[in-house]
Structures are given as C-alpha cells and as structure tokens.
Amino acid sequence: MCLGIPGRITAITSPDRLMAMAEVSGVRREVNVACVAGNRLDDLVGQWALIHVGFAMSLIDEDEAEKTLLALKDLGEAQETLEQMAASQEALQ
Amino acid sequence: MCLGIPGRITAITSPDRLMAMAEVSGVRREVNVACVAGNRLDDLVGQWALIHVGFAMSLIDEDEAEKTLLALKDLGEAQETLEQMAASQEALQ
Amino acid sequence: MKFASEFRDPAAARALLSAIAARADQIGATRAHPIHIMEICGGHTHSIFRYGLDKLIHEGVEFIHGPGCPVCVLPMARVDECVEIAERPGVIFTTFGDAMRVPGHRKSLLQAKADGADIRMVYSPLDALELARRNPEREVVFFGLGFETTTPSTALSIQQAAREGLANFSVFCNHITVPEPIKALLDDPDMVLDGFIGPGHVSMVIGTHPYDFIARDYGKPLVVAGFEPTDLLQSVLMVLTQISLGRAAVENQYARVVPEHGNPVSLAAIEDVYERRPSFEWRGLGEIDASGLRIRAKYAAYDAEEKFGIGYAAASRNVPEIEGCACGAVMTGKLKPTQCPQFGTGCTPEMPLGALMVSSEGACAAYWQYAGARTAAE
Amino acid sequence: MKFASEFRDPAAARALLSAIAARADQIGATRAHPIHIMEICGGHTHSIFRYGLDKLIHEGVEFIHGPGCPVCVLPMARVDECVEIAERPGVIFTTFGDAMRVPGHRKSLLQAKADGADIRMVYSPLDALELARRNPEREVVFFGLGFETTTPSTALSIQQAAREGLANFSVFCNHITVPEPIKALLDDPDMVLDGFIGPGHVSMVIGTHPYDFIARDYGKPLVVAGFEPTDLLQSVLMVLTQISLGRAAVENQYARVVPEHGNPVSLAAIEDVYERRPSFEWRGLGEIDASGLRIRAKYAAYDAEEKFGIGYAAASRNVPEIEGCACGAVMTGKLKPTQCPQFGTGCTPEMPLGALMVSSEGACAAYWQYAGARTAAE
Amino acid sequence: MTLRDIHVTMAHGGGGKAMRDLIDEVFTAVFQPPGSEDQARLTNDALSEPGARLAFTTDSFVVTPLEFPGGDIGKLAICGTVNDLAVGGARPLWLSAAFVIEEGCEIALLRRIVATMAEEAAKAGLRIVTGDTKVVERGKGDGVFITTAGIGVIPPGIDIGAAKIRPGDAVIVNGVLGDHGATILAARGDLALSADLVSDCAGLGHLMQAALAAAPGISAARDCTRGGLASALNEMAAEANVTVELEEARLPLRPEVVGMCEILGLDPLYLANEGRLVLFCPADQADAALAAMRALPEGAGATIIGHTLERCGAPVTLRTAFGGARIVDMLIGEQLPRIC
Amino acid sequence: MTLRDIHVTMAHGGGGKAMRDLIDEVFTAVFQPPGSEDQARLTNDALSEPGARLAFTTDSFVVTPLEFPGGDIGKLAICGTVNDLAVGGARPLWLSAAFVIEEGCEIALLRRIVATMAEEAAKAGLRIVTGDTKVVERGKGDGVFITTAGIGVIPPGIDIGAAKIRPGDAVIVNGVLGDHGATILAARGDLALSADLVSDCAGLGHLMQAALAAAPGISAARDCTRGGLASALNEMAAEANVTVELEEARLPLRPEVVGMCEILGLDPLYLANEGRLVLFCPADQADAALAAMRALPEGAGATIIGHTLERCGAPVTLRTAFGGARIVDMLIGEQLPRIC
Ligand code: SF4
Ligand code: SF4
Ligand SMILES: [Mg+2]
Ligand SMILES: [Mg+2]
Ligand SMILES: [Mg+2]
Ligand SMILES: [Mg+2]
Ligand SMILES: [Mg+2]
Ligand SMILES: [Mg+2]
Ligand SMILES: [Mg+2]
Ligand SMILES: [Mg+2]
Ligand SMILES: [Mg+2]
Ligand SMILES: [Mg+2]
C-alpha cells in the first residue's frame, strides 16, 4: 500500500497552488507540496521528498538516511568479524 | 426537389399516431398518413399514395393515371399513323 | 414499379418526341432561336439528365433549369448557421443527406461532422423526432429544408412534438415557397422564358391555382408535371401546344397525384405552424419578398432560431457570397452552366463553389456529371 | 536512484540475513515453530516477494501478510456502488489503476468500462481535479481509496476544489485507517502474531504514536519500516531483537521519512475534511468500529455519497460476499493462501474470487505470481 | 475453456494471459494456423513453377452492422480478399487476418465471425495462416475491424489487367447489382427501411478460374465493391482508354434495390457489391464465359451489360432504356440519400 | 494536387473521386506500388530456390498518440511487421498496408505517417506493394489504425523457432528494455509524467541477418512487443519446455524507465518494446552473436541477460540483484499503474 518514492524538487511551478516540479530518475511530474512547504517555498528546491500520488508527503531527512546506512555498514562489519571468528574457530577444531 | 415515389399502404401500424406501413417495390417503411387519412383509416390499406420524406402526401388517383396513359397510347397511335402516312407519301414520290 | 414504370415506356416517349418536334417546327423553334422552357423543379432537372431528354428533344426546345432545388438556393450564411448550431455541445443535428455537402463560408455540414459535430442523416423528420425521444438528454435539431412539398412534413412533426411535449426537439426552418421566385424571375426585364414546367409535388400540396398569375398576368403557359420521363415530355408538348395556339393557361399533366386544390390537411398544418417571413434570401437571386416561412410564436419552443438565438434578419445577411459565382445568372437562364467562368475550374462537384454544383439536382452538377460538359479537368 | 538503491545493497542484505538467522536461532524459532511477523502493509508484501525475501530469510521467521492493501479489503458491495456511480450518464469516474480489476457482484470497473462507462485511470486526485476543470459539463468523481498515506491527498484536493468552487468534482470516499484493524486482529483469541512491521508511509502521515497501544496493551513489538529490502530486513531484525530481549516497543526504522509525530499539514487536512464513520466493512474482517472515514457535512458538495444518494449504512451492507472465499482467514494469518480451497482453482489472478488475488499486493496473488505456489492450473 | 469473460476488455489486448486465452480459444482454435511463431512458414509448388507470379493484396473491412442478412464482417473479410486475388487471375493460397476489437465487444460475436471466416476460407480452398488482435478503448473503434491480406499464385501464362481491355470487348457481370449495398442500408436501421434483401457477399475464386478456363481471352476483371459497378468501370475504362457503353435495359437489378434507390434518390450503379465482378472479354468468347459462369451458383445471374468502344468522350456511358444517353461518372464523395 | 481538403471526411472513403484522390496523392504517390490492379504481382528468385520457404505475417497497429518521440504509428507498422518476419530468419521482401482512418483525421498527419513508412521500408530494403484505405465515422476509430502484412523468404537451411531452444542457451537482448512503453506512457499525457525518453522502435531485419550469419546455431528469436520481455520469454520457454533464468543485475534498463516504473508501480519487464528482440543461442556462439549485433546501431546495446535450464518450476525466473529469486509470470491482463 501507499507506493511512495523519493524525488527531488527542481522548481516551484505555481506558488499559489503550492505546485512544484519533482524529478525521479529523470522523470518529471508536477506535484503538490502543501505538506512540506515551510515559510519559504523556494527553499524546497533541491530538497528530496517522498512522493505519493502526486503529493510531496514528507521531506527526506538526509542525516537519518545516513544513520540508517551507517548502522547497516556497522552491522556488516560486525557480521564479517563474527563470520571470521566462526571460521577461525572452525579451523581451530 | 421533392423526391416522391408511389407506394402501397399495406397496414395501419399506429392509429393514434396515424402511422402506416408503406411498400415500394418490396421495400417497407413506416410512414405518416395524416395527409391522406379519411374518416376510416383502414380504408387506406391497399391504396397507393405518393410517399415523400416518410409521409404519404397524396393518394394516387388510378383513373387519372389511366387517363394519362391512354392519352399517351392515343398519341402513339396517332404518331404511328402520321409516320406511316409520311412513309407512304415518300414511297409515292 | 407501379405508377412509375408505365411512364417510362420508350415507345410512348418516341411518340411524344415526334409530336414535340412537330410542334416545335410548327412554331418555328430552332437551335439558334429556341423556345425556352423552364423546369422550375430540381427533380425535373434530374429526370431530364437521367433519361437524357436534353439530347433526345428537338433542338429548338431548350430547358432552362430553374431555382427549384432547395439545397441550391440556400444562402451560405444559412449554412454557416447550421454549422454553428450543429457544433454546439449536446446537439444532435439531423438533416437530409443532400444538404450535407453544401459549402458554407467556413465549412459544410460534412466537414463539421468530420470535425466532431454530431450530425446525422435522416430520411424523414419523423426519424429526427424518434432520435429526440430516444435521447432525452440531447437537443435534437432538424434542418427543415424544402419547398411546399416538404413543408407539411416538418409542420406535422412539430405538431406531433407539441402533442408529446418533446422539449428537446426543434426545427431550424428554411422552408421556402415556389410562386414568389417565379414572379421575381418574370419581373426580370431580361427574362427570356416562354413557358414553365411546374413542380408536380409542390402542387400536390398547394394545387394548381397559385400559378394562375403566371398565365393571367404574364401570359406564359405552365404545365404541372410528373417526374417520369413521359410525364416531362408530355408536359413539354402541352406547353408547346399552348404556345402554338397562342394560349397561356395553367394545366395539370400530373392529375393522378395533383388535386386541383391541393391537400387540405397539409395546407392546414402549414397554416397552423408557419407564417411568412417579410423576405428571405435565395442564393443567386437575393432577397425575395415573402418567399420564406418561419415558425409561429405559438410553436416557439420548437423553433431552433428561438432556442439558439439565431434569428433570420436581412440585416445580418451581409456575409458576402463567393465571388465569381454565376449561379444567379444560370438559375435565371441568362447563362448556361458552361458559360460560368468557374465551371470545371474553380467549381467542380468535388469542390463546389456555387450551390448549383453541389446537389446532383443543381444545373451545373447535372451538366458536369450526366452531360459530360467537362472543361479544364478532363 | 538516491534514497532507494543504497537500501538495496546485497552485502548489507547478507549481513542482515545472518544477523536475523542468529537472532532467530537464539530465540529458538524453527520451521515447525516459527516466529510470526505480520507486515501490515501490502507494499511490504510486494517488496518481500519482489526481492525474494521470503526465501532468503531464516526458516524460523514467517511473514504473515496483513490487511494493508486498501484494494484487497474493499468490500464487494462498495465496488458495486462504484460501478453504479460510474455508469450514470455524464459521469467521468476516476480511479487509481489497481482498483480497476476488483470484482464486484455484477462487474469490476474494468468490465464497466468495457460496457461503456467513462472510467479513467489517474495517477493522482490532482488529475481528477484537472479533468473536472476541463470538463465543466461532466460530473467528475474520484474514487478515494487508501489508508492514512493517501487520505491527505484526497483531503487537499477537496479543499482545493472548494477554493475554486469546482461544482462538478466529488470524491467517493473509502478511506480507511490502519490502527483499528490491527486492534481487531489482536483481539482475536486465535491470534498467533509475535510482532509487526509497521507501514512506513502511513506513519509518515500519522507518526509512530498511534501504534503505542500495541506494545503497551498487547505486549507486541512493532517496527515502522521503509520499503526497500534492507529496510524490511533491518526491521525484522529489530523485531526479533525486541523479542529476544523480552521487550515490546514501537520503534522507527524509517526515520529518514517518518517523523515521530507525523506530518502536521496532512493531519490538519484530514481533520478538516473527514470524520470517522461509526464503523466500516473490511473484506474478510467484517465491520470494524471507527475504521473508515467519511467527508464532513461542510464539504457535502464534494461528497459523492451525498451527490449520488449512496450513503454508507451498515444496514445496506448485507449483500453477501462470495462463498468459499478464505480471504479473512488468510488476512488474519490463520490460513496460508495455498490452504484456501479456492486458491488456483476457483480463484486465480485472471478470475479472482477474493480480493487478495486481485492486487499484486494481495497475499494470494503474490504467492501465485512471484512465489510460484501454483496448484491446479499449472 | 479458460476464457470466462462475456465481453472484451482492455485486458484482452494487454499482451498477457487474458490476451493469450482470447487468441487461443477464439482465433487459433478455429483457424488452426501452422505453428505459433510470429510468422507462418509456407511452401507451395505452384509458386516455384517457372513463370508463375505471386499475387498479394490487402483490405480492411469496416461495416455497420457487423452481422447482416447474408453474412457478417468475417465473410466480407475473406471474400473481399479472395476476390481481389481472383480478379487478377490468381489462385488464392493463404490469408492473414488482423482484428482491431473495440472494448466491450461481445466474445460470442467474435466467435460467430471467426466461424464464418473459417467456413468461407474452406469454401475458397485456402488457409488463414497468421493473424493478430488488438483491443482499443470503447469509442475508439466500432465493434470489430478486420484486415485480411492474401497471397495467391498467378499461373504461368495468365496476364490480365485493365490495360489489356480492347474496343469490342463484352462487359459481363456475374449477377444482380447492389444487393449488398441495399442490404446494409436497410440493416443499418437509421433510415428505418426494410426489405427482404440478402447481401451478395461471396467468394469468386472458383468462378473466376472457371471463366478463365472457358474464355482464355478475358482481358480484365474487377470486383465491384465500394463505389459499385460505376466506379470499377470508370477506373478500368480510364486505364484502358476505352469507352464502356452500358445498356440500361440489360443491367440486372432486383426490384427491391430499385425501390430502395428510388426512395432515397440513389443510383444503384454506385451501390457496393461484395460478390460481384465485372469482366471484359472478346465478344467471340463471351458466350463461353457466360456458360462457364452460369454453371456455378455465384455466376447464375451472369449477363452481358454492355461493351467497349474506342474512347469517345467519357469513360463510361449509359444508353437509357429510353433511347437517351448519359455519362456514368465516377462518384464524387459518398452517395448521400437525397430528398429533394 | 487535386486534394484540397484539410481533414478526412466520409467522402474520402466512399469509393468515388474523393477517395481516389486521397489514395493517389497521399498513398500511391509515395509508396509507388507496382501496377494499379487489385493485387500486386510479384516475383523474386530467392522464393524459388529449393528449400526456401515463404514467411507471412500480419499485425494491426493502434497507438495513442499517433506521433511520439522517436516515431509514429507508420514507423511501428513497418518495423513491427519487418521484425515479425526477421525473428523467423526471413528476409523481408514485400509489405501491404491497410489504413482505417477516422473521419476528421488531418490529411497532413497522414502524409507524415506515410512518409515515415516509406522511409522505414527503404531502410529495411523492401517495398510496400499493395494497400487499402477505409474511413470510419468520428468516434468509431482513433485517428488511424494501420495493418501491415509482410512476406519474406526464409533461405534454405534456416529453421529457427522456440521448439529448438535447448538448456544452456544464452539469452540475449539487443538493447535497453521498455523505452517504447515508457515513452508512450509519458507521451499519452494522462498521467502528466514527462521524461527525455525516445521510443526504441526500429527495424531489426539487418540485425537478425547479421546475428544469424555470425551465430548459425541461434535457436530462436522473438521481438518483445506487447507484454514486454516477460511475455515473450514465457511463451518461448513454455513452448521449449525449459526454464529461462534471468539475472536482474544484467537487465539493461534506462534510469528514466526505472523511475517511471517506480512511480507507477509497474514492472519494466512487461513494458512494450518495438525495436527489441530476445534471442537464444548456444553459449559458445553467444560472443559471436553479440559482436555481430553490437556492430549495428540497433544492436549496440546487445547483452546477455540470462540463460536456459532444464525446466524446473516456472518457465521464467529471475535472480534478484539481491540474491533472492522470483518467478517472472505471464502478465495477466494489462499492467495497470498502482498507487497502493
Ligand atoms: S459553375 Fe459553380 S459557380 Fe458557376 S454557376 Fe455553376 S455552381 Fe455557380
Ligand atoms: S485464494 Fe482467492 S478466495 Fe482464497 S483467500 Fe486467496 S483471494 Fe481469497
Ligand atoms: Mg486491396
Ligand atoms: Mg477489395
Ligand atoms: Mg477489388
Ligand atoms: Mg501480433
Ligand atoms: Mg462505438
Ligand atoms: Mg502477427
Ligand atoms: Mg508483431
Ligand atoms: Mg512478434
Ligand atoms: Mg481496397
Ligand atoms: Mg476518437
């Protein structure tokens, strides 16, 4: 449910209707930015948002994304260590 | 202008709307008979009428038709006589 | 086909042609100095060419093709109005097939249909009524076109709509009458006509007396004629006979269909539904007094002019007709179709300039199609 | 694709799968006695099958596919009403593509379209608004369908229509909410679930707190998750970790998109436009209290139920669902799709019987299409 | 039978299982084309005979209503292409059939049409070897359109065509004219006319072969479809630079067709036929051609309707029963019913 | 130029002069078919070579919009039929083209379409030898539908087809997938999406000949049109009774196509292509085939996307980049955009 996809706001197309152009992998669509519009609409340009049925529903928090990826990386390294440990243990036996 | 064609009334199809079936050389069409309806609609059945744009506009007077044809026939015979006379006159010369 | 094929008998035709030739010679008619007989009705024009009567008849008898094709005399501005109505959203515009190709200034109905207007060909105004019944959410407009023959059918359809209270049916009324333009022609000082073949189906409705003035006031014979070839030839013979006898009367060759006083039901319907317009424009002939009918106020609900705010007013009629079109001169017998500078070049049946090229009853189209009087294109 | 491809990294996935396996072993989860984790959202179901996660994950972890596909849970009677509205003359019925194939008692929207209804697929309610602007003579109805994620877009569109005074736009509102059915599932005495993957895009709107009751009152962990494969695996790991630690909390794996308190603009729009219905029917789950939204009286002009006189009333809901359909049992995790007697015989994606076979997010269709769990037909 | 739908939906054109089911059950099961590749692979000995030529033709078929007395669009689609091959002296071998189906079309109707096609193909002695289906949205089609293409073989030695027509040729048709056009006019219903008429739709392959065998001097032939006899003759006479003189009294016309034309102000010479051909042959072979044609049901009404002259004036003229003469012109646009 | 109309009217389909003018000026003047009889008469030496077979195929083309980035319906109509011949190993020789035109269609548009067709036919080295036009009323068509049929010759010794596919064959496509489908989705405008995409529409006759010359062991080929790669593979694998295993990481996809699919919830494997084929060849000839294909512009993106196995489970499976696996099923109906 609720197919959503990250897109970058590239331009404000109609300030009074709160419409902006969003781009997903080179595909452009005009979207409504009411849900993510702060005080200055122009600040949206360049930002990433989660696009759903023609609406920018939420700005994507790049720091949080980074944190999630870091956690994955850490886990990967930990797993590697674990696996190496398991392998050397096996070798010892 | 005013393409009209003789058709035979074969049945009354809707007495209140004054509609009847007319037939022209085996082609049937429902026509309005308001213009030719006398007191008894049923009397129309079997009669010939001049059909124009879906209306029976005039009943065809068979006697008059006969008279016209007779006149043509007479003329034909007269012409023939004339021609024969001309021919024999030529032959005499 | 009963009451038709009997009147197509070649033997009878030969006799008639001989008799006509004899009369013509008797009068002294020659190719150089022909007798001019106008067949008023486009249906007669059609029969003449269809059966090749123009080539069979004595060379001293020349047919002049009159203004009796309602499609041909319809002014362009009126076609424009048809298109305007037909293009309104929600409208189903119904028309007889022959009106589809008449050019307007912008386009014909055929082109309007191609451009998306919902235009339907019908055989009868009854079919338009039926469409209105079946499509209550649409406005069905019938293009009322024609002379006195057709006029009653539209009137009866309007009366029927009124009886049923069919609120979505209306008629764009362009009905016109025959006697008035004939009078206009006769009043033309250049007029060359010697006699008339009268439209049989018009007289089936109005009888023969409306033509009395032609014989009485202008001294020209008129014979109301049927549409089969021997009908036509017989009528020509009757006209020639009158001429040879120095008479001028209204005679009825088509008595099997035409009652002397016309059809009372039709006349009553016409009287009930229509009134005369002060004047109406005829393509090539201009405005002619009292020659057009409009729908009476009591039937205003069925009058497309009222419904769509398109009133006929001579004042708004100043949209110019096409330049270089000689339709008027052809229709009045002053020019032959082939003498029109446009014939076959600017004006062909594929791309008609004048209306006489549009309908196969138009004199120019008949010359082109049946008589092979081609020029440039051939 | 930024913010997407990074979360599809195979190496990270491998690490997550190992960690999951370790946790599962630690808890003692086995194929015979698995941990049941429900992914509530159909989008998650879709990702699981698209990336083959069901086959990659430790055999002691079993995904139970929840009621989170709005197309799947739509009751048949409601589809019938869609068809009824769509078939009215003058209506343009707009819908998301996935709702086209859902069977009603008489027909689906796809069939209604084939039968002549003017039904158009749109990507956004904004496109429906635009259709209304461009077709002022038509009634444009938007089929409002979806959970809290989609609800604000419809609300904002209604507000926009109101601002513009677009009289020919309305919404057939079938929006439903996530927490209520979860509560209903948890109240089921046969319930076997050990934890939940929460729908990330719903929480993007409503935040994470609406799920607090799950941890607090029912002692089950819930992790709000993103839709990329590592998002899902990471969330599963987080659930397992909670279980292994004997904790039950609402956690947010999808913090890059989901703010703790949701989106205030969306929430305000929802509050402005909708109110809760006393209850709403879910296919397979029956009536659930306060689980559906309707349009408030102040926006009645934009409410298709008002406009077309189709009110939702539980009383009129007694049109029976199809017999033999086990959708309810599948949606509550009691049966696997393949255990439904209709699966693959009476019910296939070409001719779906139950809704879980219609949408590619439905558990049955996913089993059929992606997992190859074919039966009879193969 | 996995196809449970009553009507065609967009799904049946989507390239997936629904489409495959439709094609398999409705089309392939009946036509039984050889193989299931994207192209039929064919061989025929007659094609490799020295001097043999391949004949290739195509027509799209659109008609309202889709079913009418005497046939349906499927019968038209087979006969039309068979005839376009036949009039060139070719023996029809293979046909392709492509369908553009409007969303909402009844599947039962498709089945009936396909059955007619198979039957008519069998009569003509040929196979439908390849095909296609597309589905268009409602309002973007009209039930079904069918396009057939046909391949035939013209045996060595046969070389007929309008350019071969000579002054003095007899002009022959195989039966009454205009039945198809008049039948469709009535069947369409908008003019509310009815008549006991049946379309003349028929395959003329065997007839043409028989005529050619009996009268090897046949110079040219055409089927008289859209635009009727008049259009076919105008085209041919123009190309041959002759004048065709028709005799009105010899034109075979059913009374109902004449009646329909009188009512609507139409000319039967322009009415469409779907099982009528006009052929030209030297006067001294006309009797042989007639006899061969009359021996077959589709040629039972074969008759001479005129002859060719050195070009004089118009390409086609008509001597009226009446003794007059007129030009039979090419139709301008479509024939529109007249009232006035 | 006697055709002065801007738009097509019913008159242009009526069988008369208006129709002849349209056909002469818009179609015949450009295609220049041999002769003006109802059927083209053709000869080609390759056809009478012993062992040669005739290939015959047809497709109807319907597309909205009629013109789109990278092509128009005319280009589709030529390339589609060329490709259906080519994938059977046939050398395309002749085409027929039948047009069903909606009343109101712009004549200038027809001219553009016809020009594209002539150009594309020339590229493919073949002639459009016969044709037809019909006009349907507004609301009973959709601008133009074109049906082409094609005749080609399969040289002696060439015999490829799905039934010849063997386990271990490499599966090759000639370029990125789904460009056409995504381009049309965007061009249609109802979803208000735009992207700098261009249809992949192309004739693949030369490409297929080159591949066959370089890799004579090629077992089978299909163009991946409606239903996309997934549907072509499902059909072929089912017929060959093998399993095709695709590798997700090797599927060539443009970012814009992926983006469009992500936005709409579509799967690019089901998007239509009009210049893409999938071919099967023994693993040891794959490099030769690839090299030959890459030497031509329409094969520049040729790449191996998977291989065949003895049948195990589903006909087509996909190993995700991720290490998982899933079935790539036949599409059910049409692919509908999802939101949820
Ligand atoms: S040729 Fe054309 S313009 Fe001239 S009179 Fe005839 S119809 Fe009018
Ligand atoms: S197989 Fe069909 S009926 Fe059974 S649970 Fe799944 S969707 Fe419902
Ligand atoms: Mg053809
Ligand atoms: Mg043909
Ligand atoms: Mg032909
Ligand atoms: Mg095909
Ligand atoms: Mg239709
Ligand atoms: Mg094909
Ligand atoms: Mg193809
Ligand atoms: Mg193909
Ligand atoms: Mg043709
Ligand atoms: Mg259209």
Image (cartoon, coloured by chain):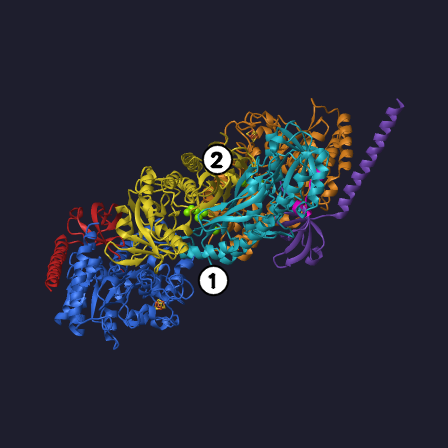
Chain colours: A purple, B red, C blue, D orange, E yellow, F cyan
Residue C292: x and y, percent? Answer: 28, 67
Question: Magenta residues?
Answer: F248-258
- Along the line of sight, the residue nearer the viewer: B10 or C138: B10
Question: Residue, x 75% and y 42% (percent of image)?
Answer: D6
Q: CA distance from mark 2 to mark 1?
A: 43 Å
Magenta run includes residue F165: no
Q: Quadrant of the C terminus of chain A?
A: top right
In the image, residue C29 sits, relative to residue D219, either above or below, namely below
Question: Which label number is shown at residue D283?
Answer: none
Element on which disc 2 rests: helix
Whether residue F256 is visible, yes or no, is yes
Is D179 on the left-hand or right-hand side of B46?
right
Chain name for mark 2: E
Chain name for mark 1: F
C-beta proximity under 8 Å, tags 2 and 1: no
Q: Looking at the picture, which amino acid does disc 2 mark? A: Phe
Residue F332: x and y, percent? Answer: 56, 36
- Along the line of sight, the residue nearer the viewer: A71 or A77: A77
Question: Which label number is shown at residue F1?
Answer: 1
Dot 1 alpha-carbon crowd within 10 angstroms: few under 14, some 14 to 19, many 20 or more: few
Q: Quadrant of the N terminus of chain A?
A: top right
Of circles 2 and 1, the one toward us is 1
Queried on whether the Cβ of the residue with tag 1 lies below 8 angstroms from ligand 1, the answer reads: no
Residue E18: x and y, percent? Answer: 53, 36
Question: Which label number is shown at residue E27?
Answer: 2
- Along the line of sight, the residue nearer the viewer: C173 or D71: C173
